[in-house]
Amino acid sequence: MTDHLTAWAACAESVAENGVAKRTIPGAGASLVRVVVPAGTSAARHSHAHEQFVQVISGSGVLETEQGRKPFSAGSVFHFPAGAWHAAMFETETVLIETNLSAQG
């Protein structure tokens, strides 16, 4: 049974070699992921097979897409359609909430 109320702290955390920490809440057609990115971290150009929304909770940096380079900060929201490439540089420690929609078959 799915919990109707979940605390991020109750979700298992995975930490990558670069220090990026993720906690995931899976769903049937989407997932939420809380991401904490250390200051100075770069995310190389990449894309996903699924649509993704990303809300910046705190922190700042620069987002790069086919539309150019744009600064972001708390309150910014990214929207990446499936297959859209993106890259980022995180100037300060940044907390993100990703909504990843299941890839359409």
Image (cartoon, grey):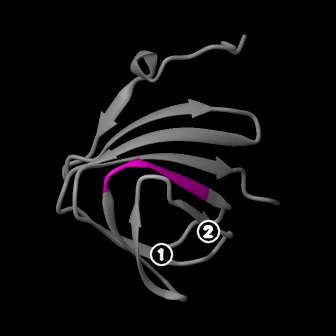
Q: Quadrant of residue 8?
A: top left
The amino acid sitting under disc 1 is: His
Dot 2 and dot 1 residues touching (CB under 8 Å) = yes
The residue shown at (20%, 46%) is: 19
Q: Quadrant of the C terminus?
A: bottom right
The residue shown at (57%, 66%) is: 48
Q: Quadrant of the N terminus?
A: top right
Q: Secondary structure at mark 2?
A: strand
Q: Is residue 45 above or below residue 56?
A: below
Q: Is residue 20 magenta?
A: no
Where residue 64 appears, x then y in whole percent?
42, 80
The residue shown at (49%, 17%) is: 7
Q: Which residues are magenta?
A: 53-59
66 or 56, which is in the foreground?
A: 56
How dense is the environment of label 1, judged by Cα within 10 Å: few (below 14), some, or many (20 and up)? Answer: many
Q: Secondary structure at mark 1?
A: strand
Where residue 11 appears, x then y in whole percent?
45, 22
The residue carrying mark 1 is 86
Where residue 61 appears, x then y in whole percent?
31, 66
How dense is the environment of label 2, judged by Cα within 10 Å: few (below 14), some, or many (20 and up)? Answer: some
Q: Is residue 7 left or right of residue 82?
A: left
Mark closest to the chain's N terminus, 2 or 1:
2
The amino acid sitting under disc 2 is: Phe
Q: CA distance from mark 2 to mark 1?
A: 8 Å
The residue carrying mark 2 is 80
